[in-house]
Amino acid sequence: MGGLAAAALATGCATTPKTAGTGTAAAGAAGAPLVVASPALTNSLDPAAALSNVGATFSAQVYEPLLTFGADGKLEPALATAWRVIDELTVEFTLRQGVKFHRGGAFDAAAVKANVDRLLSGDPAFAFRVGQMGTLSGAEVVGPDTVRITTDKPDPILLNRLARLAITDPAIFKEKPGSVASGTGPFKVTAYAPAKSIDLEAFPDAWRKSESVKSARIVSIPDPGTLTTALRTGEIDGAYGLPPSVAAELAGSFVVKPVPAGSCAILSMIGEVEPKLRDKRVRLALNLAVNKEEFVASGLSGYGEVPNGQLLQPGYLGHDPSLEAFPHDPERARALLKEAGAEGLTLNIATTALFKQQAEITAGYLAKVGIKCEVVIQDLSSFITSLLKKSETPLLYWQTDYVDLHDISGVNRLGPQPKGVQRHVEDEEYIKLFASSQTEMEPAKRETIIKAMAKRLHDEAGVVFLAWPQTVYVHSSKSDLTLNSDGNVLLAESRKGA
Amino acid sequence: MKTDRTGPRVLRAGAVWLVRLAVTVLGVLTLLFFLLRLSGDPAAVLVGPGGTLEDIERVRRELGLDLPLWTQYGAFLGDVARLDFGVSAYTGEPAISAVLVRLPLTLQVVGATLALALLIGVPLGMLAAARARRPSGRAITAGAAAAQAVPNFVLGMLLLLVFALWLGWLPSYGSESPLHSVLPTLTLAAFTVARVVRLVRAGLLEALSQDFIRTVRAKGGSRLRVLARHALPNAFPPVLAFLVVDSAYLLSSTVIVEQLYAYDGIGKQLVDAIFQRDYPIVQATVFVVAVLVVAVSAVGDVLGALADPRVRREAAG
Amino acid sequence: MRPSVRIALAGLVLIALAVAVGPLLLGVDALEQDLPAKLAPPFWMEGALAGHPLGTDQLGRDLLARVLVGGRTSLLVGFAASTLACAVGIVVGLLSGYLGGWIDRLIMGLGDLWIAFPFLVLAIATIGVVGSSTPILVTLLTLAGWVTSARVTRTIVKQVRGEDYVAASVGAGAGHLSVLTRHLLPAVASANLVMWTFVVGTMVLVEGGLSFLGLGVRPPAPSWGTILSDGRELLETAWWIPLWPGLALTLTVLLVNLLGDGLRDALDVRMDDHA
């Protein structure tokens, strides 16, 4: 058999699937499962305990929220068919009827309330989701198909938040946390090996059925090189979450789909660590020092866009198309640094191993305008502490994700901070604008505020704007992966090649 | 007369072993407890980069991390005594079962590596010593030196290309079948086998120069025969000592091959847990590894005593 | 001196010189990035760039300069850590094996404790508290590596202690120190030389792994280990990036092996009869 396989390769059929050890022979009559891989798997089958960056793809197949973002970025019905605002603190939802959980129970208002109550119970496993839900304070059953959601203060983006609240079957709340699943989505979980694989099977009673894919498998392959090999041998059909350099290598032989990641790669400049960064001229100089086009082409292998001097990408509320990107002008950067008396400054960049190369490229540009710059790699726990509490290094390279909330509120690091916490942006005007964007309920006024924030951050050169990165999906030309508006695979609308 | 003494002696050895186990495990866990808490915050990972300081503090309270360190340590020792390492705050899995589920896969790879070291490493080492001055012996020695100079992830990638992509004989990732453990084992074994080859060779050459071997040789024993019969027993204990330590390293350092082949053992789990500051998982893994290390170490001592010709001579006399 | 020792020494001195003086002679900045020139292949291939004989890396930096400069850290860390680890191991192993009794048990217990302990936790905690520097790195790697050598040494000492010539020496009234240095040390030398030759290469690689986790040298400063681990993703297309540090490392390890074997033979003059 090995000889045959080698011969097949020699004739160029690199993607011929081989039975050797795919280990999924159990898929049975329904045909082989569609296998998608990524470097990391969800940490939990419970969507309330799943961290956003690793859990979203899994959740999107098995669970559904009340409402969701459509292709145009507007909210659309999902498990709720309609909603209306009762007062500043209350929204009423009319629920979709006849929806069943995988375990057979009916989806109703009581289930929604049970989900909200559990989330607010104080279990540390839900810390991330609770933070995301922000103002959410409770739920109230009005009728079997009507539920009211309340907040403890007026929240202009409550609906955005609720789009991230995946509804779980209350029947499994008492079972082993994190390792059982029952939702309303088009797929149910048939097997789970933590950190390794999740087997899915189409749920026949779903209100939104899987058309072509009957069984699927999400696996984790941490090494990009191995993932590439597995794509080539046909052991996997598609992949997501790849480093851009690896995706670029695959572009020749596979279909590569980049989608906007809904985030902005920036350098935070912490004035508390290096007071010279409080000088606008220095901040401007750093923005001018980096060649953003080259950064996107090399650091992101082309999978990204040069931002026009603001955080939000087009399509997000408050994006201002009239702003302009900072040009690459090392001469002027040097002059500004000289003027500010900041020549020969040492500005180290902290980041995580994931962004090592991007941070290194940035450091290379800063070196060219005479700034001494080393990259300090931190593990996730330490880096988040640097980000949230106190940094030892003056610069932080990270990506401000606003895709989750579809709103500038996601970039709360740059907003007001409690006493004793470092400020990423010290400009009072920006902080004031941010605070008012959090309470303004009138959408048109709110958009004006967010545009004013963008202008202010641009004028103050409040952060170093580097790129709007893209998330990359790769699949063989025989299969097809469809993505939802959040940039997650929708297996229900995908297809496995023959 | 001998049989009279065996019983108590075995009992005594068993008791000594248990004390050693308890002291070692306690020492490891204590050191681990304090170093882990010195170096990071699980609440930060749970809350994520979008969280706030209050979120972190709330999670710390809920996890009991705001209590004085000594209180936490006391509670921890109580839990260890009941073999209860708690539940991973990150995955919700009970820590000890999360480790035990993955342990067999790691043991399989480590065991196979040790077997290869003995079955291939020792004979090759003997050959290298027997032909120390001939090209074949030099080739083996040089090959062993080269094998340890190739980084294991480079070797791993090459094996993947050849066996998974070009030949299609082996799966490239996963751990569902014994077939899946072939590449991880080969990658891991390259280092260990190379070391054993060179240790055996050095030990044999050393032994060959000793007087009693010279006497045997003077009596006309063939070189290979002398090597196997007389020199090997002398050269073997250091190799054994090396393998004991190496198996301990292998147990906790299979992470690179596990990462490379998405092989679901305890190595990758441990490293991920360290980075997430998932205390229950780290503590349970280290506990299991420590027990195994003490066990392997004790077995090594017994085997060493049995293999040592002088000890055997004493026993016989 | 044997020819093999001479070759090995000459080779290692040459490498050390190249690494120490080479970057100065070359006059190319190992940190200077030039993104349009990234991933240029070495000189014999199509697309090679003038001034970059060994090619460039992902950031368009000159690989020759990076391998030379990176060798400084790698050789320093590799040799210092492996030598110290073996030295500590020999001393501890000699004491443990020679003194026996509870000291032996204590030391071996410590050894078990140490190898069961995850090195990564130690490294993260230490560097989190005192920061990262070459001496810290060498200390950590020494701590990580001493047990192998100690256990092997102890085993050999236990074997040899019973030998007639050692017993005779003790009987003749030789002091502990004299027995240790004159009889036991030579007996453990050969196995430890073998250990040492392994460890040099391993330490260079471990340093590379650690710096990927932010625990080794800080980017953009190079080391062989970091160039290797950064280049691994591109093994299939830009294979020359891992090739050069890999070759440098392999050559160094081979020379160290040759040196180790030569020294072993030189210590053990009786070997010659068996040639």
Image (cartoon, coloured by chain):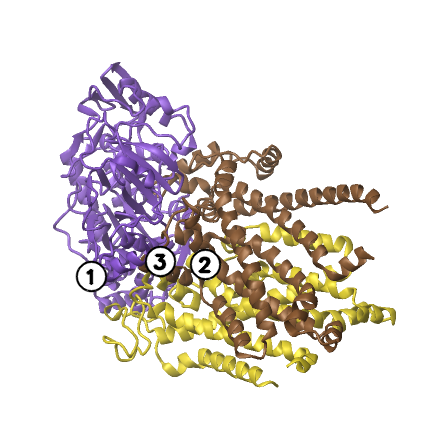
Report the mark closest to the observer, 2 or 1.
2
Q: Which chain is brown?
A: B
Label 1 Cα neighbours within 10 Å, binned few <14 / some 14-19 / many ≥20? some
Q: Which chain is purple?
A: A
Tag 3, which secondary structure? Answer: helix
Closer to the chain start, of discs 3 and 1, is: 1
The Cα–Cα distance between marks 3 and 2, rounded to whole angstroms, is 27 Å
What amino acid is labelled 1 in the image? Glu
Q: Which mark is on residue A356?
A: 3
Tag 2, which secondary structure? Answer: helix
Q: Which mark is on residue B187?
A: 2
Could you tell me which residue is drawn at 31 percent across and 58 percent down?
A: A3
The residue beneath circle 1 is A293
What amino acid is labelled 3 in the image? Lys
Judging from the image, mark 2 belongs to the subunit labelled: B
Closer to the camera in the image, A490 or C61 = A490
Judging from the image, mark 1 belongs to the subunit labelled: A
Could you tell me which residue is drawn at 25 percent across and 20 percent down?
A: A148
The Cα–Cα distance between marks 3 and 1, rounded to whole angstroms, is 19 Å
The Cα–Cα distance between marks 2 and 1, rounded to whole angstroms, is 41 Å
Q: Colour of chain C?
A: yellow
